[in-house]
Amino acid sequence: MNYANIKYCDIADGVGVRTSLFVSGCRNCCEDCFNRETWNFSYGNPFTEETERQIVDSLAPDYVSGLTVLGGEPFEPENQEGVLSLVRKVKEKYPDKTIWIYSGFTLEELRSGSRASGDTCNRILGLTDVLVDGRFEKEKYNISLLFRGSENQRLIDMKKTLQSGEITLWEEKP
């Protein structure tokens, strides 16, 4: 897996101060994607054990709320093992930090019938706190939306969704 960028003090891609990993590789190719360079699986730098360690270590301060993984597409089959390794280590070391993942796939597509679905995908979803799902749709662009770009995209509370079996949208706590 390659990555395009790492932001160590990101406040735009989830609640609080976060470390955000932008993976490379995406076949969804949404029109007007804000990160087109990440469509190429070879773009950026190789995701190494040292990169993973640096990301995990960056989460140590109390003021860091968690990790966000976006891209590119974290659920492309080529990216899943690297993403799973990272989120597993983060949850083991920091069980109270949140993991947000942005995907162009809907949760329904991730669960079955897409190139992304399968056991590794399910394990990633089981470690995810919030899934921001759905392709960016230019005609549904809305700058006033919280943590997403188009009105079709959902912020899904994965813990509640997996517990209830029904899609439960994330609600910001006051």
Image: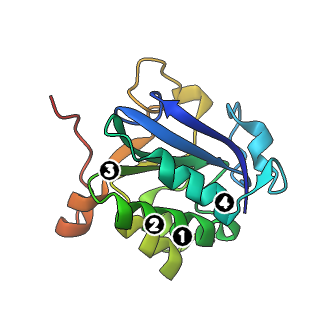
Q: Given contact means CB atoms under 8 Å apart, are the residues at marks 1 and 2 in contact?
A: yes
73 over 114 or under it: above or below: above
Q: Residue at x 44, y 38 (%)?
A: 18
Q: Is mark 3 on a helix, strand or loop?
A: loop
Residue denoted by label 3: 97
Q: Which of marks 1 and 3 is nearer the N terminus?
A: 1
Note whether residue 129 is visible: yes
Residue denoted by label 2: 89
Is 87 in front, or is 101? 87
Q: In which quarter of the image is residue 75?
A: bottom right
Q: How far apart are marks 4 and 2 (CA)?
A: 13 Å
Residue denoted by label 4: 50
Tell me the amino acid under the disc marked 3.
Lys
Tell me the amino acid under the disc marked 1.
Ser
The C terminus - image quarter = top left
Q: Which of marks 4 and 2 is nearer the N terminus?
A: 4
Using a 10 Å C-alpha cutoff, classify the residue at mark 2 as few (fewer than 14 neighbours), some (14 to 19) or many (20 or more): some
Q: Which of marks 1 and 4 is nearer the N terminus?
A: 4
